[in-house]
Image (cartoon, rainbow, N blue to C red):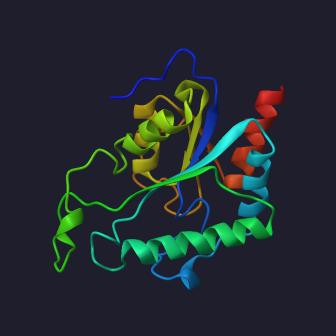
Amino acid sequence: MQRTSSKASKKAIFLDRDGVLNVEKTFVLTPEDMELYPHTGEAVRKINESSYLAIVVTNQSAVARNYITLDELNRIHDEMYRQLKMSGAYVDGLYYCPHREHLDDPPEDTRFIVDCECRKPKPGMLHQATVDFGLDLEGSYLIGDSVRDIQAGKRAGCTTIGLRTGHALKGLEDPPDHIFDDLQQAIDFILDKKQG
């Protein structure tokens, strides 16, 4: 398990992808399926203009399920980047987990059937970003719409924010630190809190 160095000073706002940045669909399988919420670009741009890094952490089991290839996933993310750029926004880092521990319905891509450390609710993607960027996790936030997101953020030591978009925290028993209607409200809260 990675620990943050006492010298770490950078802070991040970790963002789940589906249901937080873009409209939740069963699976996003093509660039055309990538539909950012209307407020996403502005919200991410506000992060870019702050001292926080914008880092996406997303489970993408469609790869393990053999619905898409890694190349196709990269093209979907290229479309996300393109749409963000139209709003003058960008992400500083993107981490995805293509794995599943097991699948009930073959055909799966057996290369990705792994009991990994990166699939949320495990905090592996957040820990990798900490290594890559030198982050202070205790000073960072995780914004998500699902039980897995919130659990990963808590395990990493972040302040957790749940959204009522996407999965809308369905089935969550251990609540996040804060809950908001959408990403824009969450980002305004974080940045107003920092100024206050």
The answer to whether 22 is drawn above or below residue 125 in the figure is below
Quarter of the image where the C terminus is located? top right
The spot of residue 52 in percent (x, y) is 70, 38
Among the 4 quarters of the image, the one containing residue 106: bottom left
Say above or below: 127 vs 78. Answer: above
Q: Residue drawn at (47%, 34%), measured in percent from left and top?
A: 131
Q: In the picture provided, is 192 more to the left or to the right than 101?
A: right
Tell me where residue 193 appears, x and y as whole percent. 77, 30
> Position of 61 compared to 71: left or right?
left
Q: Nearer the viewer, residue 132 or 153?
A: 132
Could you say where residue 92 lies in the image, as x and y percent from the top left?
A: 63, 49
Q: Is residue 107 above or below residue 131?
A: below
Residue beneath the point at 55% across and 63% down: 19
Q: Position of residue 1 (x, y in %)?
A: 32, 29
Asked where in the image residue 83 lies, by quadrant, the reply is: bottom right
| Residue most extreme to the top | 6
The answer to whether residue 7 of the structure is visible from this angle is: yes
* Residue 26 shows in this picture: no
Tell me the residue at 60%/68% (across/down). Answer: 22
